[in-house]
Each structure stands twice: as C-alpha cells, then as structure tokens.
Image (spheres, helix red, strand yellow):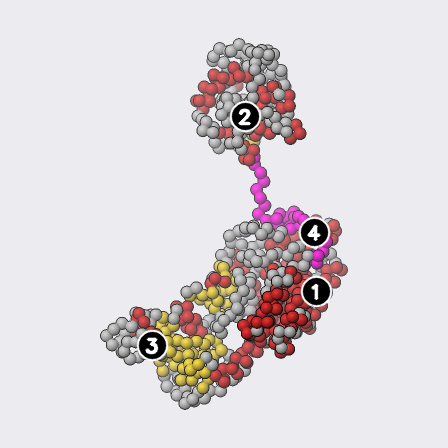
Amino acid sequence: MSQRHSDSSLEEKLLEYRFHSELRLDARGNPASGLPMVRGTLQLRDNEGFQLDTPVSPAVSPKDEEPRAVVLSTQSPAALKMGTQQLIPRSLAVSSKAKTPARHQSFGAAVLSKEAARRDPRLLSAPSFSLDDMDVDAGPGGALRRNLRNRSYRAAMKSLEAPGGERGPLQLSPKLQALAEEPSQPPARCPAKNKRTLGRKRAHKGSFKDDPRFYQEIRERGLNTSHESDDDLLDEPSSPDGTGKADAPIVVKSYRPAQITWSQLPEVVESGILDRLPAEERKRQEAIFEILTSEFSYQHSLGILVAEFLQSGELQATMTQMERHHLFSNILDVLSASQRFFEALEQRHKAQVCVEDISDILEEHAEQHFHPYVAYCSNEVYQQRALQRLMSSNAAFHEALREIEKRPACGGLPMISFLILPMQRVTRLPLLTDTLCLKSQGHPERYKAASRALKAISKLVRRCNEGAHKMERTEQMYTLHTQLDFGKVKSLPLISASRWLLKRGELSVVEETGLFRKLASRPTCYLFLFNDVLVVTKKKSEDSFVVQDYAQVDHIRVQKTEASDPSLLGGGGSRGSSVPHPFQVTLLHNSEGRQEKILLSSDSASDRARWIVALTHKERQSPANKGDLPQVEVTKAYLAKQADEITLQQADVVLVLEQEDGWFYGERLRDGETGWFPEDFARCITSRVAVEGNVRRMERLRVETDV
C-alpha cells in the first residue's frame, strides 16, 4: 500500500512504458485486431495525452497468450496507470474536488475490470465504457479537464462479484477496503427526531398488559424535568448499552423505559391517524398513555407485595399482629385505590383511540379516592422502624423474608423496594401531570383542566408529606421529653405541636484556659437543635442527657473560625493542631438571661458546615435566581440517617445550595424539602436547557401547591 500515494511523475512513466503493451492498442489508440469490442471504439485523435512516445509492441495472438489471473490491487500495473487526462463514465462521477491523490487510481481500476470482462464471460456485468457514457469537458485546444471525481474503482470491485453471489477466481487483497468507504447515511440522532416516524417505527403486537414490568424498574419519560426536545416522549426504547449525548438529562442505569408507546399501538397504527395528527397532539397522547401504562406497572408491583409478602403464611408466623400492621399498614386500601384509578384510565383509553382528556379523572381521584395514600405515608416512620427491628432481632423473619425474595415472582427485588412504592408513585404523579399540562398549552380548555388536576395532586402530596412529618415529629418529641433532664436549669416545656428536631450530635468543647490538653481528653457537649430553640446538654448515656443551658434560635449567633485563629492560642503554645474544625456559638440570651460564648470543634469540615447551616437556618434566604444554582439528579435512593439529612428517590432532582467535603446540601425539586446527602448518590446536570427547565417546573409545582 506504500505506492498508493505515488507522485504523478512515477505514474506517467509507468503509463508511457506499459499502457499500450498491456492494453494492446495500436498507434492511433484503437484496440489491436483480434480483440472483441464491447461498446464501440475508444478514439481520441486530437488528445495529445493519448499519443505514443515509444514503439508499439507487436500484438500477441490470443492463442499464444497464457491465461493469467488479474489481481485487483493498488499495486497492480493497471491500477498505477495514472494520466493527467482521463475519461470517466458520467454515472460513476460526482461533482466534487479530490481530497487525496489516492482517489485518482480509479481510472486504471475501471480499465482493469474491462479487460477482466473480456477474458472471463462471467464478469461481463462490469459497467460499459464508451464515449456515449462520457462527460467530457473540453478545454482550449481540445484538451480534457478532470473536473469530476469518479467512483469507478468501487464499481469495478463490485463488478468482480460472480453471478449468484459466488466469487470468481480473482482474489482481492485483504488491504483493499474501498467498499467500506462507500458513503452511507449518517445514523439518526434518535428515532424520535425523524419527524416522519415520531417514535412509531415499530408496531407492537398485542396489548401493553401482555408483558407487565415492575414499577421499580421503569422510569416514566414524563419525569424528565426538562425536555431538550419535545420529541423525548416519542423516543424509541434505547438499547441497554446505548449512549446518549453528554448534556442529555441523566438516565438512571437501573431504569428501563416503557415497553411501548402510544404511537406503536396496533390500533393506532392501523387507524392511520398518525398521518394526519399534529406533532403536538401526538406528544400529548404519549403523555396520557404513559400515565396509563405506568399506573399498570405500579399496580402490578403492588399486587406482588400483597400476594408474596402480605399474604405469606411463612412470614406472618414470624411476627405479631402489631408488627404486621406497622409493616404493611393499609396497603390493601392503596391497591384498591390504584385499581379504581387504572380502570377509569383504561376505560377512557378503550373508548377513544385518540383520548380527548384524562385531567378530570386525575382531579377526581386525587380529591376523592387517594386518601389511603395519606394514611400509608403517615405510617412510614413506624414501617421503617418495624422493618429494622425485625431484620436485626428476628432471625426467623429474616430467613423467611430471604426465601420469599428469591422467588421468581419477586424479580430478585427486596421487600423494601415494594414497601416504598406508594411514596414513589404519589410523588411522581405531580411531575407526570405537569408534563400533561405542558403538552396541553395549545388548547386553553384542556390546559385549564390539566392545571386543576395538577393543583389537586400537589395538595395530595403536601398532605402526605405533612402526615409523615407529623407522626415522626410527635413521636420524636415524646421520646426526647423522657431523655432530657433539666436538673438545676429552668425547665422548658419541650412538647409542642409546632416544634421539631433539626439536628443533634456531640461536639468537642475548646477550653478557655491556657492549659493544653489532647483532643481525646477534651470535654464534650451534646447539642439538640430544634426549629425554635437550642439545648446544650451533657451526655450521660445513650438515652439520658443533662441539660446545661438553652437559648432561643433567634438569640444565637454563629461564627466560623480556623485553626490558625489567634483566639485559639493560649498559654504560650499553639492549639491549632488540636482544634481541626472550630466554630463559635454565642448565646445572646441564655436560660438565665445572660450572654454566653461556646467555642466548639467538629471532627470534619462537612460536620462543621452542617452545624453552621442548621444553626443559621432562619437567617438563610433562598437565592433569587435559582437557575444559577448547580443541579444534580439522584442516581440511587438514599435514606436519611440524621435529622438534617434528606431522603431521596432515584431520579429526584435537587438544587445544590451548599457543598462541603463530599456532601451536598440541597433543595428537592418536587416539594422544596432541604437536607444533606452524600455526593456519591447523585450526578451533576450539565445541560443548560435541563437546568432552566427544572427551575420552571419547580415554580409551576410550588404555585399549584401554595394556591
């Protein structure tokens, strides 16, 4: 292949030396006598590029000539016969400039295919080569200009295929990969981007109910909080190893898209409605259909929870009736509500190929039939505690549960993934309804109906959140009331319906004396920070604390300090090395009405940041322009372990307000809840379109909730 890019001088010499001897042309450029003519005589008497400068070799009779195999290669003599003036077929050329000299080898290859055809009748399928097919551009003096880039080299290679797909005796060099260079249509950016198909390339047979999927394994397209293109709802399901654009909304790996879209339904394809339906209306139909199919998957998974776990005799025999109630709560009522909701959606779907609207169904069920969700979410704290206790202290329960989870019907999923399904569904419904609102903007009446449905569902979510918080906070305050001993300090009425715990934990106290002590021996204090008061205690045991002081949150000031701060120096020695992450808390008006300063130290930078954020929560204001804040999407569920942390579900979007030492402090998009969570559980959203779309959706959801 090193001769592929040989210069023109070498080519001209080879042409002059071998051209006529191998092609057997006479002095005038005509084929020698005895050779068959294919499509006329090749003559160019006025073209000096075809005149001979060397004596012509005597013609060899066909019978004296030994048959020889023709090797089609860039190193073959014919392929190297390059001239400055060429004749090429019009059908084998395109009007473009040659980029590399190697492309100009095609003339020799075309002639070689002609000679091969003359010798082997099986190769007569080669393209004919005559003046009738030429596109000759005559210049001054009759000279020919090579103004076309030909593809006869590839055509010659194709012509070497024997009839019936069998190859002849000609063997191609393994390095000849010219056919791979044949221009091809670039791959489509996404099947849904093709406006002619819009996600309906394949027509699925049967019903979407034929192959139910676990709700844990799907992610509704409507959860994409910003559609970089409205066609996202119409995308074909991607392959498991497919890759997307770097800036596309993040797709969680464990999720699988819905197995069928509205445009792929047999009844939709056969009706022919797709050919006359506007693109925006198709997107609205896809949003409606996705609510239907996702509700079916959700109902299917709830059925597995009831059949395999709730009604399991083996599991029931390992726990008390109270534990069973705390674990499963009113899941049967939730399943019944889901069944009624799905039946209403399916009835509307069966009645109309192109569904008029489902907003009325959403609004009615959110207001009148979804109240079991509030009771189930309110029981969440008891449910989690019961499951943890049973798993840690009940070996029979643990063993029975493990055997059930191995069953094929459970799909290898743990029971906890089924127990949290109602919480997941009720928090996804507002996002799906918001997508329906967006797709209905072109129709005022439908948009108003969808907005009413969004308002009703958002209120339902708020009631579920409030119910869960209320039960958790009430129980927590009763527990703390029994653990705190005020002793000599003026008692504080701790139990209150408007009070809840924000953060608790143990911190080191930096002594004010000049004596140096090791960090391990430094005294500690245990803080309880409520939404309205800070209580400073001394820990006696895991469930007993002696109150030393307290102050209203409004009378607290917090200052971050560094280990090199002069205030940490004393007694002629530096104490900075023993105070890794200090901060100062000032009680402007403590339990005795005096001002008190406490210099504290935490074990890590993230712990100090979390305490400062918690202690200053009333002073902190939400940024005016949330579009400037970084955003992350949760890639795996996170269960809060401390009061200042936030529980997150897969695909939750969070606005990042603080970032410190491997932790994010952020605001959850769907409901405005704030808290800390590890960075490892989320990935940054880099698309500007996605970020702005998330902010707009957050504003819509908050407006509907506050109304």
**How many angstroms separate mark 2 from mark 3 (CA)?**
87 Å
- Say whether residue 203 is magenta: yes
Question: Given the image, on which type of amino acid does mark 4 rest?
Answer: His
Q: Amino acid at mark 2?
A: Leu
- Residue at left 30%, top 71%? 576
The residue carrying pointer 3 sits among few (fewer than 14), some (14 to 19) or many (20 or more) residues within 10 Å by Cα, namely: few
Q: Secondary structure at mark 1?
A: helix
The residue that mark 2 highlights is: 72
Main secondary-structure element of the magenta-colored stretch: loop
The secondary structure type at the circle numbered 4 is: loop
Residues shaded magenta: 182-210
The residue closer to the viewer here, 378 or 361, is: 378
Q: Which residue is mark 4?
A: 204
Image location (x, y in percent) of residue 347: 74, 62
Q: Amino acid at mark 3?
A: Ser
Q: Is residue 383 left or right of residue 353?
A: left
Query: Nearer the N terminus, badge 1 or badge 3?
Result: 1
Depth-wise, is mark 3 or mark 4 nearer the camera? 3
Residues under numbered marks 1 and 2 in contact, where contact means CB atoms less than 8 Å apart: no
Name which of mark 1 and mark 2 comes first in the sequence. 2
Of callouts 4 and 1, the N-terminal one: 4
Relative horizontal placement of residue 309, taking residue 500 as reference (left or right): right
Marks 1 and 3, Cα distance to the nearest angstrom?
63 Å
Q: Is residue 397 visible?
A: yes
